[in-house]
């Protein structure tokens, strides 16, 4: 194992030794490494990055009699061992005026960094220290190392949590509980008995990508921007500026470097260890390094050649719709905070109508945060402002994904007597405007074999208590079918206090599989997650459990009022808790011919998939929402 360290592989050494058998004796305690930051120093209020990619100062966690900075590197095995204990300590000391902050240092993505809190049930906030400034300010060098600051931000303790977990083994007990002793001393106003200890663990490393002047836009980088960036940043696309030619990228190279380094763009929030998705927007690691190395070399253009003339996309992503429904106009002010706008389109489908593709098309994309199209029984129109609770979701518009297109042979059914409605979230952009959205529907050209259905996991009785940093809610349901289900996609949805979320499948043998984990849920991007066709098949009796946590604390920069109890509701300042699963039934063969002019069936040998009761598919709940 010494050889591993000598070869410069400290992480591999840490991982191997952390898996070593428990040791019954405590290894000799080494002396702490010398540090340029002396104990008793006043620590500056350094800047970090929160889970929303916002710059924050550590003092924004709030006033405290003592602050514990927990330094980690995502994937470090010793950090994984200590985080549950640190979570317990935080809950113990919270009411005594102690604040804990997790600070991830290193090349991990934001999702990987924030997942440490979700995976280990930690309620305190995690942030990213991309450049290592926070770690350097207190002399932290390893994961998991803690630093304790008093109320005046004076460094009073630096070192390990306790003496139980070491690289060379594990004690049967914690030995000296260094962090607890330090906290008790600081809270009592006395000198810390043991102010510094050595810390085992993984080194804290800052990502550094060297400049590569051999990379050029024309040969290496331009194609990457065309593939990953231009779809949202070309003329007619919803992106706020162009990134489809060299001059446009060069002018904005500073901001491009920042968002690519932080993996803020392209937007993607699924944890990479839990599922592979066909619509994964994230930059592959090699492409990301290429772009950063090119930018570090001041973005050479290479051989000057005429940029290819971009093929301007048509008005509709789905092609010319067969039916276009106009929504009433909505006046959007120049500034302010708007609640959701619910819009009834007025068109009633008199017969069952099959739809292959749906697109929501705002007239003013710049002010539309997201929009959702649903159908509901026409007699309910105008009866209840909270129709969102019982509407059936068809499509979601977010920048970069404006249309829903099903594979040929698969279609939505809008039942006879239904009408379409839109729920739109507007964000003022400094200019008063009028938005007149439209919804385009394309009807099937090929026979419909399978109906795309939607299963909603929710808890409409949700109430998030005040000041809670990680309030948990869960919903579990199944579909009562005797055939396999093929799940195509999932759309999680929360509001401003949504923190993290997870979807699991619980198989009939009680085996569980994580289908999706979103450790840093972001209300700004209402993304859905698509599996490759046929990749996710589930036997009859499989249950689906959606779990999420809500951050109603003052540290949540988007929290309108941390002192409020927040119910489920339509307003943006209320909360929602939804996961919509879109699925088909394996083996279903409807053989349904559809008139492409109307979407109505003209002939079929329709055979509904059987249920256990030989009835139409029925959704059964698996229990009420579970709260912590």
Image: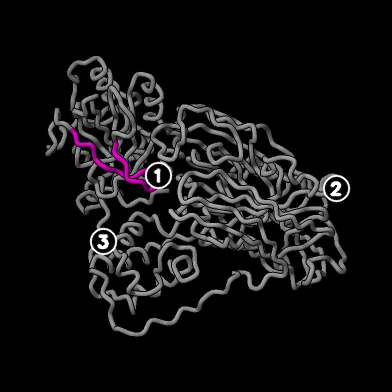
Q: In the rendered image, which residue does mark 3 sit on? A: 209
Residue 273 in view, yes or no: no
Residue 144 in view, yes or no: yes
- Spatial CA distance of label 2 from label 3 is 60 Å
Q: Contact (CB < 8 A) between labels 1 and 3?
A: no
**Image quadrant of residue 327?**
bottom right
In depth, the one of 343 and 249 nearer the eye is 343
**Image quadrant of residue 34?**
top left
Q: Contact (CB < 8 A) between labels 1 and 2?
A: no
Task: Categorize mark 3 by other alpha carbons within 10 Å: few (<14), some (14-19), many (20+).
Answer: few
Q: Position of residue 23 (x, y in %)?
A: 32, 31
Label 1 or label 3, whichever comes before in sequence order: 1
**Image quadrant of residue 68?**
top left
Label 1 or label 2, whichever comes before in sequence order: 1
Q: In the rendered image, which residue does mark 1 sit on? A: 51
Left or right: 3, with 576 as reference point? left
Q: Residue at x 58, y 60 (%)?
A: 362
- Spatial CA distance of label 1 from label 2 is 46 Å
Q: In the rendered image, which residue does mark 2 sit on? A: 615
Say which quadrant the C terminus sits in: top right
Left or right: 379, with 165 as reference point? right
Q: Position of residue 150 (x, y in %)?
A: 23, 25
- Disc 1 vs disc 3: which is toward the camera? 1
Q: Which residues are magenta?
A: 43-58
């Amino acid at each position: 194992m010494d050889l591993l360290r000598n070869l410069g592989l400290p992480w591999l050494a840490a991982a191997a030794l952390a898996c070593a058998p428990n040791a019954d004796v405590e290894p000799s305690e080494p002396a702490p490494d010398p540090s340029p930051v002396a104990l008793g120093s006043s620590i500056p209020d350094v800047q970090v990055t929160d889970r929303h990619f916002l710059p924050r100062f550590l003092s924004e966690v709030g006033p405290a009699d003592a602050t514990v900075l927990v330094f980690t590197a995502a994937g470090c095995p010793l950090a994984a061992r200590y985080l549950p204990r640190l979570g317990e300590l935080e809950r113990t000391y919270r009411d005594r005026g102690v604040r804990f902050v997790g600070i991830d240092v290193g090349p991990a993505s934001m999702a990987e960094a924030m997942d440490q809190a979700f995976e280990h049930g930690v309620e305190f906030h995690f942030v990213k220290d991309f450049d290592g400034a926070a770690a350097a300010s207190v002399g932290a060098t390893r994961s998991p190392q803690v630093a304790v600051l008093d109320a005046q931000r004076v460094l009073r303790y630096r070192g390990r949590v306790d003496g139980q977990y070491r690289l060379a083994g594990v004690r049967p007990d914690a030995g000296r509980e260094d962090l607890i002793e330090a906290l008790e001393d600081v809270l009592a106003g006395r000198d810390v008995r043991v102010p510094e200890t050595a810390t085992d663990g993984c080194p804290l490393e800052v990502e550094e990508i060297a400049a590569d002047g051999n990379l050029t836009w024309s040969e290496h980088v331009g194609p990457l921007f065309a593939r990953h960036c231009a779809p949202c940043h070309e003329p007619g696309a919803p992106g706020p500026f162009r990134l489809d030619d060299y001059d446009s990228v060069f002018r904005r190279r500073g901001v491009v470097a920042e968002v690519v380094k932080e993996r803020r763009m392209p937007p993607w929030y699924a944890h990479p260890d839990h599922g592979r998705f066909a619509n994964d927007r994230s930059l592959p690691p090699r492409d990301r390094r290429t772009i950063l190395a090119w930018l570090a070399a001041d973005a050479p253009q290479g051989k000057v050649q005429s940029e290819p003339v971009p093929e301007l996309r048509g008005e509709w992503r789905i092609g010319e719709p067969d039916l276009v429904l106009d929504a009433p106009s909505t006046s959007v002010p120049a500034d302010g905070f708007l609640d959701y706008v619910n819009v009834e389109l007025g068109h009633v489908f008199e017969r069952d109508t099959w739809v292959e593709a749906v697109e929501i098309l705002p007239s003013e994309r710049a002010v539309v945060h997201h929009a959702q199209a649903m159908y509901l029984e026409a007699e309910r129109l105008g009866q209840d402002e909270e129709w969102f609770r019982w509407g059936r979701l068809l499509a979601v518009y977010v920048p970069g994904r404006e249309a829903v297109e099903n594979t040929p042979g698969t279609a939505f059914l809008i039942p006879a007597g239904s009408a379409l409605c839109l729920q739109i979230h507007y964000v003022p952009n400094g200019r008063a405007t009028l938005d007149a959205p439209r919804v385009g529907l394309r009807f099937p050209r090929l026979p419909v074999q399978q109906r795309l259905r939607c299963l909603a996991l929710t808890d409409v009785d949700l109430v998030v208590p005040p000041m809670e940093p990680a309030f948990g809610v869960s919903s579990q349901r199944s579909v009562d079918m005797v055939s396999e289900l093929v799940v195509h996609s999932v759309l999680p949805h929360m509001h401003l206090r949504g923190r993290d979320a997870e979807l699991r499948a619980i198989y009939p043998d009680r085996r569980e599989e994580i289908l999706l984990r979103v450790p840093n849920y972001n209300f700004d991007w209402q993304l859905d997650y698509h599996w490759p066709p046929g990749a996710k098949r589930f036997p009859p009796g499989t249950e689906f459990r959606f779990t999420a946590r809500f951050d109603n604390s003052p540290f949540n920069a988007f929290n309108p009022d941390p002192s409020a109890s927040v119910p489920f509701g339509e307003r943006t300042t209320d909360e929602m808790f939804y996961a919509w699963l879109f699925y088909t039934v394996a083996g279903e063969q409807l053989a349904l011919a559809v008139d492409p002019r109307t979407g109505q069936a003209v002939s079929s040998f329709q055979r509904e998939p059987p249920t256990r009761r030989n009835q139409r598919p029925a959704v059964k709940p698996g229990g009420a929402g579970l709260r912590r």
